[in-house]
Amino acid sequence: MDVHNDVGLTAYLVNESRARREDLAGDPLAREWISDEDRGAVRDLWDEFGGHVYPHDDLVVSLRGRIILDTLAEALAKRSDMVLVVCGAGFSSYPWLLPFAAAMEVDLPELVAAKRRRAAELRAAGVLDQREVEHIAADLNGPEARRRLLDQIRQFAAGRPIAYVAEGLVFYLPPEHARAVVGLGAAAGPQTLTVVSYWPLAAADHSVLAAQRRWFRKRSIPEDASYLTTSDLSAVVGAPVENHSTEDLQRRYLGEVVVPETELIPEHVAVAGS
Ligand SMILES: C[S@@+](CC[C@H](N)C(=O)[O-])C[C@H]1O[C@@H](n2cnc3c(N)ncnc32)[C@H](O)[C@@H]1O
């Protein structure tokens, strides 16, 4: 994997963001996903991103990760037979942080290969326990790939409730595909909890997103983005949405708004379903 270009690069960046705030993120495994050999390059990349786009990605990404982790833990406490499905999983750690009955991670082929490889190394080193996590390679922009994935999720869940996560993903997909990916978990079963991070339509002109577009252009990451509203999300999932802004999350986890959303990537987390 080239850590310097294309959309897979964003998985390295946000992993570094969680590794920098592992207490806030609640993810002690974040630092393990990148080998010592690659970590220096990832840190340099993060610093460059921080200088050109904004210096608070550690805050935004750790807050979103923490609310997702807490939401999943709460759901699992109510339904111990719940299975986890994470789309655009990157180097996130939920399957190893929580005792789900079964877990599936989906990402682009190159990223899946890198995650599988590193997971095997970490299992061998005793850092990860022996639990089985299914890694599925799929381009979520393809309707046929999504149909196949939907069948795989249904089989995998086998009637059990599903916790479905799409974190840091849907804004990179064209609008029709973004909506379809938001709705995938709910389409797979009636007892699905959907947790999705997204950029609100009202923030489409945000100055930090404009700076990020300029930086992405240099890195061959597509700049076009999808923005959504809570009504869009609710219509796709078929349930009311609970919304968490970056300021709500700072109040919840830090007791106050340390950095206003005008200075942050305006990434909100929506939670819907049972
Ligand atoms: C910003 S990263 C987020 C990774 C992870 N969810 C996290 O929060 O650490 C975006 C992820 O989405 C994946 N991704 C982007 N486009 C995708 C597509 N069309 N199909 C599947 N995965 C995709 C990337 O490979 C990357 O792992």
Image (cartoon, helix red, strand yellow):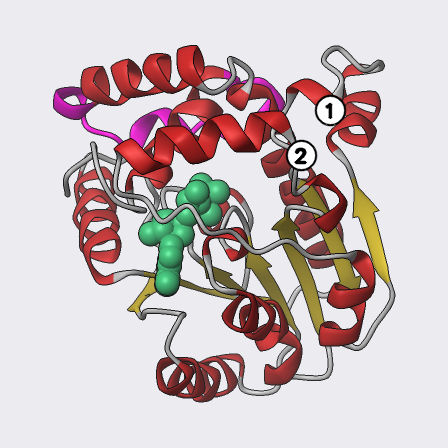
> Given the image, on which type of amino acid does mark 1 rest?
Glu
- Quadrant location of the N terminus? top left
> How far across and how far down the image is residue 17, in percent?
46, 24
Instruction: Name the mark on residue 261.
Output: 1
State the count of labels.
Answer: 2
* Picture quadrant where residue 261 is located: top right
> How far across and how far down the image is residue 160, in percent?
62, 79
Q: CA distance from mark 2 to mark 1?
A: 6 Å
Q: Is residue 9 left or right of residue 21?
A: left
From this view, report whether residue 191 is shown above or below residue 124.
Answer: below
**Near-viewer residue (262 or 254):** 262
* Picture quadrant where residue 51 is located: top left
Which residues, given as a range, are shown in magenta? 21-38
Question: In the image, what residue occupies the spot 69% across and 57% down?
Answer: 228
From this view, report whether residue 75 is shown above or below residue 65.
Answer: below
> How far across and how far down the image is residue 209, in percent?
55, 33
> How far across and how far down the image is residue 69, in percent?
63, 42
* Picture quadrant where residue 192 is located: bottom right
Q: Earlier in the sequence, mark 2 or mark 1?
A: 1
Badge 2 crowding class, 10 Å Cα cut-off, few under 14, some 14 to 19, many 20 or more, is many
**Near-viewer residue (55 or 251):** 55
Q: Is residue 246 left or right of residue 142?
A: right
Callouts 2 and 1 close, C-beta under 8 Å: yes
Badge 1 crowding class, 10 Å Cα cut-off, few under 14, some 14 to 19, many 20 or more, is some
Q: Which residue is mark 2?
A: 266
Residue 142 drawn in magenta: no
Q: Secondary structure at mark 2?
A: loop
Question: In the image, what residue occupies the spot 20% across and 32% down?
Answer: 4
From this view, report whether residue 186 is shown above or below residue 89.
Answer: below
Residue 31 drawn in magenta: yes
> Given the image, on which type of amino acid does mark 2 rest?
Pro
Q: Secondary structure at mark 1?
A: helix
